[in-house]
């Protein structure tokens, strides 16, 4: 494939990652490709097992799942987060819980457990959030060159990031700019080998009145994930590839 073809194929895969499942017209429009081009590339991706089609709808295929499982940072984080996330979901009944990684100043989800907030806005592994969600404040607090999200003015964003620094990385977001019904608490996962923030743990809820009460639980969960991650990468340094 030439570079233009590869760019188009990845644009389609990115759109399917975001939408989960969609028809040809939506995929072509959102990826910025002509409909005929999108159709041709989708047929090629289906042949390769990267995309599958059911009842006129397209979605990510099993081959991409297996490729994604081999990405070491995500694999290590999933292993480190599995039991802590289950405990967090139990402690906060109905919460949608996840672990995300920084990806060019945005949040890439690597592990999730479904909860009530997913009825308003479903979050799946592999999803990259729109720029400006709560966890993005955390990345901006620790990585100063993070780009300004388009949904905030520079003054608003600086104030939000200062608040995260003031609370040692804890993010309390009463209203998501993209999904007002969903509120979030997020906490940093700090890898003890380097002191680097490598991920975040967050709980998404529909009732913003519980945010302060669940914040300590989210912070403890992030610390548990960090401890597990350190043990895993100490035993197998090849897993530490951030």
Image (cartoon, rainbow, N blue to C red):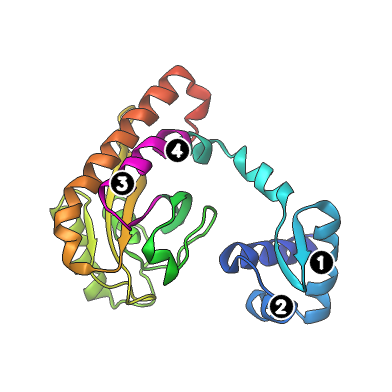
Identify the disc placed on residue 28. 2
Q: Does any portion of residue 191 appear in the rendered image?
A: no
- Classify residue 181 by image quadrant: bottom left
- Tag of residue 90: 3
Q: Give the residues in magenta.
A: 79-98
Q: Is residue 156 magenta?
A: no
Q: Is residue 47 above or below residue 160?
A: above
**What is the C-alpha distance between the residues marked 3 and 1?**
43 Å
Gap in Å between the C-alphas at discs 4 and 3?
Answer: 20 Å
* Mark 3 closeness class: few <14, some 14–19, many ≥20 residues within 10 Å: few
Callout 4 touching callout 2 (CB < 8 Å): no
Residue corresponding to mark 1: 41
Which of the two residues, 204 or 197, is positioned nearer the viewer here? 204
Image position of 171 with respect to 154: above or below: above
Quote the CA–CA distance across marks 1 and 4.
32 Å
Q: CA distance from mark 4 to mark 2?
A: 33 Å
> Which badge, 1 or 2, comes first in the chain's sequence?
2
């Amino acid at each position: 494939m030439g570079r233009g073809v590869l760019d188009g194929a990845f644009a389609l895969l990115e759109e399917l990652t975001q939408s989960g499942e969609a028809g040809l017209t939506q995929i072509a429009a959102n990826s910025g490709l002509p409909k005929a081009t999108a159709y041709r590339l989708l047929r090629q991706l289906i042949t390769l097992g990267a995309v599958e089609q059911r009842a006129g709808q397209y979605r990510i295929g099993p081959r991409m799942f297996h490729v994604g499982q081999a990405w070491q940072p995500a694999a290590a984080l999933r292993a480190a987060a599995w039991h802590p996330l289950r405990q967090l979901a139990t402690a906060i009944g109905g919460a949608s819980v996840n672990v995300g990684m920084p990806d060019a100043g945005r949040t890439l989800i690597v592990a999730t457990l479904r909860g009530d907030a997913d009825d308003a806005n479903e979050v799946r592994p592999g999803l990259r959030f729109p720029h400006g969600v709560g966890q993005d404040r955390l990345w901006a607090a620790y990585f100063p060159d993070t780009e300004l999200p388009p949904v905030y003015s520079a003054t608003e964003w600086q104030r939000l990031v200062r608040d995260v620094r003031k609370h040692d990385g804890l993010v309390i977001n009463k209203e998501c700019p993209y999904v007002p019904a969903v509120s979030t608490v997020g906490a940093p996962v700090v890898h003890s080998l380097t002191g680097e923030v490598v991920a975040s743990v967050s709980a998404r809820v529909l009732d913003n009145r519980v945010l302060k009460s669940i914040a300590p639980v989210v912070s403890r969960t992030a610390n548990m994930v960090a401890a597990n991650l350190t043990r895993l990468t100490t035993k197998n340094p090849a897993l530490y590839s951030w």
